[in-house]
Structures are given as C-alpha cells and as structure tokens.
Amino acid sequence: MTSSHTHSHDVEEGLRFQPKFDASGLVTCVATDAGNGDVLMVAHMNDEALRKTVATGEAWYYSRSRKKLWKKGESSGHVQRVVEMRMDCDQDAVWIKVEQAGAACHTGRRSCFYRAVTGEGGEAKLTFVDADKVFDPAKVYR
C-alpha cells in the first residue's frame, strides 16, 4: 500500500474527523429539513464555521460574498438547529439535517430551491414551485 492509498483509506473508512477544505479554505454544506428531508440550502463552511456548528449545535457558515463568518438566522431570527451532521466519503462536503425556524432563504422562502428547471424545445426555463414567502426580506434585512 502506498502512503496516499493509506491516507485515502483512513479518510474514507476511518473515524477520524479530518475535513478537506478547498483552495479557498471552504467545504460545501447542504442543509436539509430534519423532518421531511427537503433540501433547504447549500452554503459553505470554513474551519471556524464548522467548529462553531459542532460546538453550538446551530448552523454557522462562511459568506463568500461578504468574506465573513455568519450564524444562520443572526439577522432574521430564522436559525437552524442541527439534528445531525454527516461528512461525505472523502470529507470535502458536509450534510446537516436541521430544524429550521422560519425560512432558510434570504428571499423569504422556506427553501432556496423554489424554482424548477424545465426543458421546452431544448431550452431551459425556470418555473416557480413551493415559492410562497414566509417573510418579507425588505423588513427583515435593513
């Protein structure tokens, strides 16, 4: 066995938590509703966000656009309580099952995935699905 194979085996089959961050220091995180399995959002975590999520039991992320750490719900009050956290096989992606207070999406919707992609005549188009707003973003984010 080569050392890279041993390392790969340890990451894929071992029980040591060793997240693999990308060149920007981030891992992708998928958040789903712990009750019904709906995908709520996809975001990114840096090392600090990942550690705070584990330590507090609430979701923390790293905003690539604002270049800062943020706790989900810090502005809106729509926090995510983590019920379970999983790592994928090579530990470069995180899946959290959460109890979502209010809405997950900054647009005011329960999920960030409120548009379906359809193909008509070979052209992709978007249509709204499950797109009702839970809150008015203009009133929440001032």
Image (spheres, grey):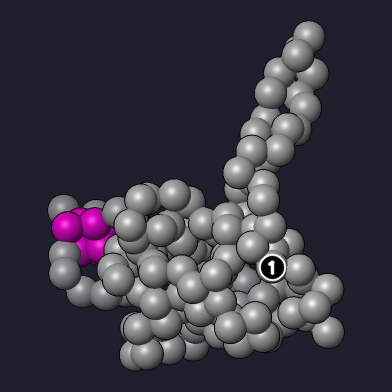
Locate residue 103, reporting x and y percent. Answer: 58, 66
- Residue 15 sits in quarter: bottom left
**Residue drawn at x 83%, y 84% as measured from the top left:** 142
Label 1 neighbourhood size at 10 Å, few (<14), some (14-19), many (20+)?
some
118 above or below 93? above
In this orientation, does residue 8 appear? yes
- Residue 115 sits in quarter: top right
Q: Report the magenta stretch's main SS.
A: helix
Q: Which element type, helix, strand or loop, lies under badge 1?
A: loop
Locate residue 133, reporting x and y percent. Answer: 68, 57
Q: Which residues are magenta?
A: 7-13
Identify residue type, mark 1.
Phe
Q: Describe residue 25's horizontal placement relative to residue 9 as left or right.
A: right
Q: Is residue 36 magenta?
A: no
**Residue drawn at x 51%, y 62% as measured from the top left:** 28
Q: Describe residue 65's horizontal placement relative to residue 82 as left or right.
A: right
114 above or below 14? above
55 above or below 9? below
Q: Depth check: 138 or 9 in front?
A: 138
- Residue 78 sits in quarter: bottom right
Q: Is residue 11 magenta?
A: yes
